[in-house]
Image (cartoon, rainbow, N blue to C red):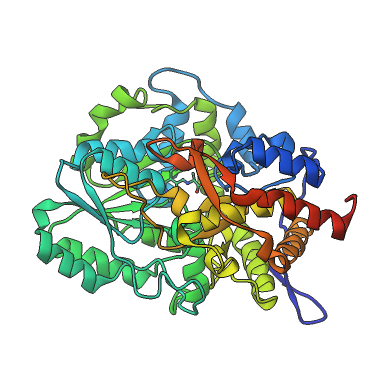
Amino acid sequence: MILKLYNGKEIPIDMYKTRVVQRIRLPKVEERLKAIEEAGYNTFQLKTKDVFLDMLTDSGVNAMSQEQWAGWIATDDAYAGSMTFYKFADIVKEVLGYEYVMNVHQGRAAEHLLAKVFIKPGMIVATNYHFTTTKAHIELAGAECIEIYTDEALKTKSNFLFKGNMDPEKLKTLIKKYGRERIAYVRMEATTNLLGGQPFSMENLKEIKKICDEHKILLVLDGSLVAENAYLIKKREKGYENKTVAQIVKEICSIPDLFYLSGRKNTCVRGGFIATNNKELFEMIQPWLPVYEGFFTYGGMSMREIGAMAEGLREMVEEDVAGCAIEQIKYFVEKLDELGIPVVTPPGGLACHLDAEKFLPHLPKNEYIAGALTAALYIASGIRAMERGTISMDRDKEGKEVFADLELTRIALPRRVFNLSHIEYAIDRILWLYKHRDLIKGLKFVYEPPVLRFFLGKLEAIDNWGRDLCEAFKKDFGEEL
Ligand code: F0G
């Protein structure tokens, strides 16, 4: 929630109190340098003992509510026919309006099943923007993933409120070019992760659905951040200001033919599911569930996770839950923007995103700009962020580098985990880093895996710049704490 102060300023206020805590430690800068060198300048490879604020992701690291913990305990453990699953299915109906649901172990498992059932080699999937695992599954199934975003989407500094929109004209052209038979499905992602958590508008989603219907093409919604997209619609789209997030979520869900999500984000628990009101589509996918995931009433999740997810689903559409990370992100982004630090605007969901290309204009694209900035941020602060740029793209079939449209350092805000003191600290260290940006140079691969290379890849700092940054830091801060 946003609270207006006596001095006229606004702050995001936490509508919960903390009753269980996990201690964290701020390693000294020399330790941080050693840790990132050992991690091959890849923050995925750091151990959490070396991390101060873990802002790598908002996935699977959110704080559950006491009601979710109660749901976790009070479950019916059964291989088949568990009543916890049926209770969960009732809540899916109540919150999202879907009649049919199947659980999967996480979001990418849903992507795998959709690719298995709907994609044949040579087909294409059109999307408002890809996500890493989505693209991998589409391509592994032999299809091509084509992005048809609006012209504003790639402008990191923008006032356009719906950078997650799909361009309807480009979709029509694409259908004309390929023919509807070659299009496996159109995929909309609720708050486009790799564009900086940017939402689509309800108007746009409806327009895309109309085009899909005219050509009898399936519309699939990745709703991993559906509650946050709905919250941003409420804040930004005319006609929705007086609707509740719960109503907007239901309206969004009434549009696509198929819906899936990674529950690790909005429902604050590991797992995922596919849901629909179309029995025929459901029955095309369902036989594959026990092959790849698990029996129909658990689908690769534990009953405890399903119990907690049921409660998480109900809570995610509450205003204070849907908006808790978004309001923190807004505060974070606006403060950095005021300081002249290049960030993705308008603020979106899931994270604050630094525009690494503008932050480090002296670096060439083939030296992994966002990877360098992400590693530098860790050295300067102990904050673990995530590279969302060229390292997150795999090479093409010929082995050529595919440069990302955007070079972003994503500083994620898990729900109900960090508070304003952490954000103020992050802002301060980012400002310091910005003043010392000339010290940061590029990276080069020393080990590069063939698929999703950002997870396991190892890199090294060109000219050992990590050491220079560490020395400059010691000059300004001496022994921290
Ligand atoms: N779709 C979107 C939009 C996602 O953000 C993610 C995961 C997935 C699908 C895959 O789901 O991880 O449960 O298998 N995003 C995480 C992130 C990994 O850090 O942004 P998953």
Residue with the most extreme top position = 79
Q: Quadrant of the N terminus?
A: bottom right
The residue positioned 49% from the left and 62% from the top of the image is 364
The residue positioned 88% from the left and 51% from the top of the image is 480
The residue positioned 54% from the left and 72% from the top of the image is 345
Residue 4, placed above or below residue 58: below
**In this image, 256 relative to 198: left or right?**
left
Residue with the most extreme bottom position = 8
Query: Is residue 40 visible from the viewing direction of this image?
Result: yes
Image x and y of residue 185, in percent: 22, 52
Query: Is residue 99 visible from the viewing direction of this image?
Result: no
Residue 201, placed above or below residue 380: below
Q: Nearer the viewer, residue 268 or 366?
A: 366
Q: Nearer the viewer, residue 134 or 430?
A: 430
Image x and y of residue 95, in percent: 44, 50
Q: Nearer the viewer, residue 133 or 456?
A: 456
The residue positioned 55% from the left and 42% from the top of the image is 459
Residue 208, placed above or below residue 78: below
Image x and y of residue 57, in percent: 57, 47
Residue 241, placed above or below residue 224: below
**In this image, 67 relative to 151: left or right?**
right
Image x and y of residue 266, in percent: 52, 49
Quadrant of residue 324 in the image? bottom right
Query: Total of numbered circles in the picture?
Result: 0
